[in-house]
Amino acid sequence: MKKFYPILFALFLLQTSSLFGQRYLNEVFTNVTKTPNIVYSNNISFLTGDTTTVDLRFDLYEPTGDTEAARPLVLYFHTGSFLPILRNQTATGDRADSATAEMCRQFARRGYVAASVDYRLGWNPLGTTQDIRTGTLLLAVYRAIQDARACVRYFKKSYSVDGNPYKIDTNRMILCGQGSGGYIAMAFATLDKTQEIQLLKFLAGETNATYGFVQGQPYVNQQVWGDYDGFNAAPGFGVSNHPGYSGRVRMAVNMGGALGDSTWLEQGDVPLVAFHSVNDPFAPFGVGNVIVPTTGQFVVDVIGSQAIIKRSKNFGNQDVFNIPYNDPYTTRANSINNGLEGLFPFELPNPGPPLNGQAGPWEWISYTDLQAIAPFYGVTSGGVDTIYQSAFFSNPNVNNKDKALAYIDTIQGYLAPRIVQVLQLPGYYTGFSTLTSGDFTVTVAPNPASDRVNIQVDAAIRINSIELLDISGRRLTAISQLNNNLASLNTSSLSKGMYLVRIQSDKGVISTRFMKD
């Protein structure tokens, strides 16, 4: 049953109608157009132990039939433990993974452009020493950061040089990472100083010529591997892609994953949103160790989503989110996140040995699909059987698509108003009562409102209709055929929180928000 709140306008007849979707907050498009295999850069891969130059690609998702010419862009990075799917002994690790593709489709149906991005893979989790495991993993993350920045620059270059073929707004770009992609997103958002990769735990304990490690020196030697943008690498170690453009974004999101060290995160870094299983066996929710799942061997100590968001909050980086919300996703998150705005913990039962924790509840897999791709990765049918069964250890319902989609819906529902707020998309909360569209000005007063709020536009403008929505974009009521520049709204029956007013006038549409106290 739909629940409508009674709203009384002083001068106008109240009318109600069906639910309305607000672009960027809700899915307002039905169909999504996918353009696969777009090359954004090329660089040197070390996956097989031999160096080879490879093309790096993304799949583009956009709303079908969209006429907007400047749309916000989400760059999405898949999971996979920095190794190819199946070869990593897991059922995920590709830009077409089920959850990865679904997240991109949902972004597109909300009006965003989304790119599911490949990045260079390769490290040695079976290394016989901690130096090998820690050093090669850090290098894998480092190369992925370089690739992510190259992808950002690719889109900015396409805007400036190629006539903006993807119809994006290069000032409104965010990064989202899932699983090991979460490591990329968090490191991308925070790493910007050479000394941050020269901490004691990132120095080689012994010299190893095979991997280029020198005792007492950083695993990542920027004179060899290039800087964070991938520029100025030694010959044979990296390729510079799209110089002259910024590799920065406005916001980063992680679904699992972790941050290599707390000191990487500093005041002034971009705002963060994190989704994490509290008992994740692969990446700590708070502070802990990364281990090799198949052997249990130590790799590196890291900080997880809870510690990341707490530190970001303490620096004031999360202040942009300090607005009133009244959606059920925020209510649930706030009941369990200890006041850490931007953190959505998932409390999942312990499935028991061997991992005693759950991860990636948003993921689902298909046995048939895994068998179909196995020959391309040199994995036998029996190997797929083992990998498929092992997936249930950390995700007991990993074959349940409906369950996974429920988690994805929750992630999108919590994330949507926060992206709107950071990117200042239509309807974002300003804290002011007056908003100008360029063609006319709307004033909502008082704001916050108690029993009544007045909506007024310029005297020469005629309001055709007004719609009232909650923060999730659900329409509560509407009124049409006003033909006036003023309306008075009785808000006494509304619950406390923030609401969106969408005004359709003879000069266009404008949206603003007010708070009910």
Image: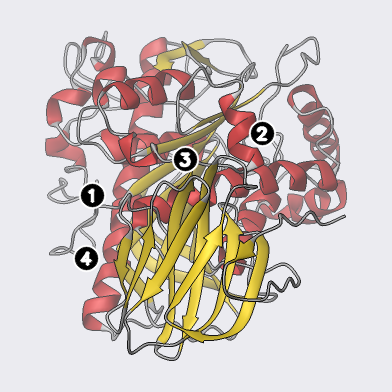
Q: Residue at x 86, y 42 (%)?
A: 400
For the residues marked 4 and 2, what is the alpha-carbon distance in whole angstroms?
34 Å
Name the N-terminal-most of marks 3 and 2: 3
Between circles 3 and 4, the one closer to the viewer is: 3
Q: Is residue 283 above or below residue 444?
A: above
Q: Earlier in the sequence, mark 1 or mark 4?
A: 1
Q: In the picture shown, does residue 56 fall above or below 16?
A: above
Q: Whole-percent x and y of residue 150?
A: 29, 57
The Cα atoms of the two marked residues, 3 and 2, are separated by 29 Å
Q: Amino acid at mark 1?
A: Gly
Q: Residue at x 56, y 41 (%)?
A: 79
Q: Identify the amino acid type marked 3.
A: Pro
Q: Which residue is mark 3?
A: 324
On the rendered image, what quadrant is the N terminus found in? bottom right
| Mark 4 or 2, nearer chain start | 4
Residue at the spot x=58%, y=76% of the render? 63
Q: Which of the two marks, 1 or 2, is nearer to us in this view? A: 2
What's the mark number on residue 236? 1
Choose mark 1 or mark 4, whichever is in front: 4
**Of the residues tagged 3 and 2, which is closer to the observer?**
3
Q: Which residue is mark 2?
A: 360
